């Protein structure tokens, strides 16, 4: 009886609000609604399919995706953003701002969890100039503004563009020169969708000609191809990035795709569920189109859906700063925006000074050197010898970037309380939460 109830409820949920919170379980079940509590080994979900909240064992959880629509405070694009990001030695990352540094601790201010006092030996690095990306588009919020042929295979429902049969839907999003495209793709039986980017065509061509990037997603994996312009010698398609990894995470029938395109350097980077799958280089001049097309390749027996579409302008300068390597494990290193590196001991930070300088003692100078904040690119801390326990039960992904390893989660209407293995007890604003997943 329970199995049939779960199955019917899960299928019904696939047709309900995809803008709701989403729970993915190990057995492949999906539930949609509003998570009202997570504590004591149970997830409580408010859903229109049940008068009383559903209680789901969190030991069966794969991932919990939080909808931004539940917050009456702000939309995701209105949330406070920071241009600094701190990385702990256990791999966690936290957006915020350095407000103090002494010989033992760094004080890091966050808007969602307050002031964090972090021992230096737990910190790997701090990146500066991580400028928030300008948002070009976020949606969909309806079918208006999207174009398709008269067969109308695509429809809008519950925050998603959905198609059960072959057909396309497109929109000129005025793609900038360098951009980050992302979307959640969901399917009933198996994924089968193509995404055309940087095209100037109103619809996909059937003869294989064109001038665009083509992202293929199916049960065999993910592939990024270059559709070569007309008149080019050789094959009509050039494979740039390919992966045979199954799109769904541990049996889940949804995934998050992200493609970063730098048309100036012709570099493309593909991400699946937040993990980088690979990088490719366009062998010819990048296509100059500004439109996006979704093409369903479904056979007519099951839905493919696209939701949570976003388009950001890509600040590729930030990526260059992130490539600046650590100089030595036994010394602190402060790299500046012109490529110079100062190794030794980073002594302090003076936020009251107009230039907000970091003070560095190096073996090459008898006197400490002051580095203004505006010139800082990345700061690495000496690697310690003792590494405290770093693994929590869950990973919390933040809507403004960053992730935290947590245990003992207690989730309420506005706040999440949990223990971090290094930072201790934290209280985090719910509006910043993007997803919670079980750690391996």
Image (cartoon, rainbow, N blue to C red):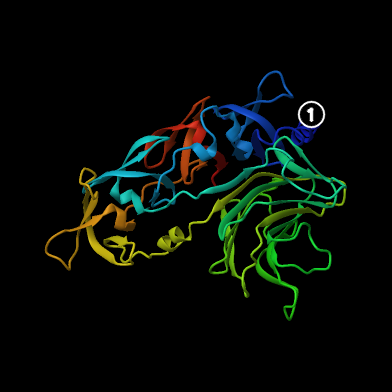
**Percent from the top left, x then y, of residue 244?**
69, 62
Q: Residue furthest left?
A: 366
Residue 284: percent from left, percent from top = 63, 75
Judged left or right of residue 265, residue 84 is left
Left or right: where does residue 282 sit relative to residue 210? left
Image location of residue 170, percent across then percent down: 74, 51
Tell me the crowding category of disc 1: few under 14, some 14 to 19, or many 20 or more residues within 10 angstroms, Cα based. few
Can residue 230 be seen in the rendering of this structure? yes
Tell me where residue 20 sits by quadrant. Answer: top right
- Of 420 and 234, nearer the camera is 234
Residue pointed to by mark 1: 5
Give above or below for 332 relative to 146: below
* Image vertical order of residue 192 relative to residue 423, above or below: below
Find residue 16 and report its horizontal and vertical position in percent.
Answer: 74, 32
Q: Dividing the picture into quarters, in which one does residue 330 lie?
A: bottom left
Q: Please, which residue is most extreme toward the bottom here?
A: 233
Judging depth in this view, the residue of 353 and 202 nearest the camera is: 202
- Of the 4 image quadrants, the one containing the N terminus is top right
440 relative to 242 in the view: left or right: left
Looking at the rendered structure, the secondary structure element under dot 1 is helix
Tell me if I can see residue 381 in this picture: no
| Residue at x 28% of width, y 52% of height | 373
Total numbered circles: 1
Residue at 85% x, 49% y is: 165
Viewed as shown, does residue 248 lie left or right of 354? right
């Amino acid at each position: 009886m329970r199995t049939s109830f779960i199955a019917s409820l899960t299928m019904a949920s696939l047709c309900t609000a995809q803008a709701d919170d989403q729970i993915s379980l190990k057995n492949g079940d999906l539930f949609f609604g509003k998570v009202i509590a997570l504590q004591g080994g149970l997830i409580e979900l408010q859903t229109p399919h049940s008068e009383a909240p559903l209680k789901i064992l969190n030991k069966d959880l794969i991932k919990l995706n939080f909808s931004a629509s539940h917050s009456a405070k702000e939309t995701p694009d209105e949330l406070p953003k920071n241009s600094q990001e701190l990385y702990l030695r256990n791999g966690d990352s936290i957006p915020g701002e350095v407000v103090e540094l002494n010989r033992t601790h760094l004080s890091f201010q966050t808007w969602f969890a307050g002031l964090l006092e972090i021992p230096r030996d737990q910190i790997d690095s701090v990146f500066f100039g991580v400028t928030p990306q300008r948002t070009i588009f976020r949606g969909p919020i309806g079918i208006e503004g999207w174009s398709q042929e008269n067969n109308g295979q695509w429809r809008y429902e519950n925050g998603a563009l959905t198609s059960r049969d072959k057909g396309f839907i497109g929109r000129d999003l005025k793609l900038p020169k360098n951009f980050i495209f992302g979307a959640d793709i969901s399917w009933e039986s198996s994924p089968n969708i193509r995404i055309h980017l940087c095209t100037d065509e109103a619809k996909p061509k059937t003869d294989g000609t064109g001038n665009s990037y083509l992202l293929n997603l199916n049960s065999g994996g993910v592939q990024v191809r270059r559709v070569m312009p007309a008149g080019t010698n050789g094959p009509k398609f050039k494979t740039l990035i390919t992966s045979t990894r199954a799109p769904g995470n541990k049996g889940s029938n949804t995934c998050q795709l992200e493609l970063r395109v730098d048309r100036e350097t012709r570099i493309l980077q593909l991400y699946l569920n937040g993990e980088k799958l690979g990088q490719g280089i366009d062998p010819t001049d990048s296509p100059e189109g500004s439109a996006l097309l979704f093409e369903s390749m479904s056979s007519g027996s099951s839905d493919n859906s696209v939701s949570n579409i976003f388009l950001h302008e890509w600040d590729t300068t930030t990526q260059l700063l992130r490539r600046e390597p650590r100089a030595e494990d036994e010394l602190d290193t402060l790299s500046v925006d012109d490529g110079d590196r100062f190794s030794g001991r980073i002594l302090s930070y003076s936020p009251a000074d107009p230039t907000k300088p970091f003070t560095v003692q190096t073996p090459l100078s008898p006197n400490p050197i002051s580095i203004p904040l505006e010139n800082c690119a990345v700061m690495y801390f000496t690697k310690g010898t003792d590494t405290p326990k770093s693994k929590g039960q869950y990973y919390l992904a933040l809507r403004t970037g960053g992730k935290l390893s947590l245990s003992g989660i207690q989730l309420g209407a506005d706040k999440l309380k949990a223990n971090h293995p290094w930072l201790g007890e934290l209280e985090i604003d719910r509006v910043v939460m993007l997803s919670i997943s079980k750690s391996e």
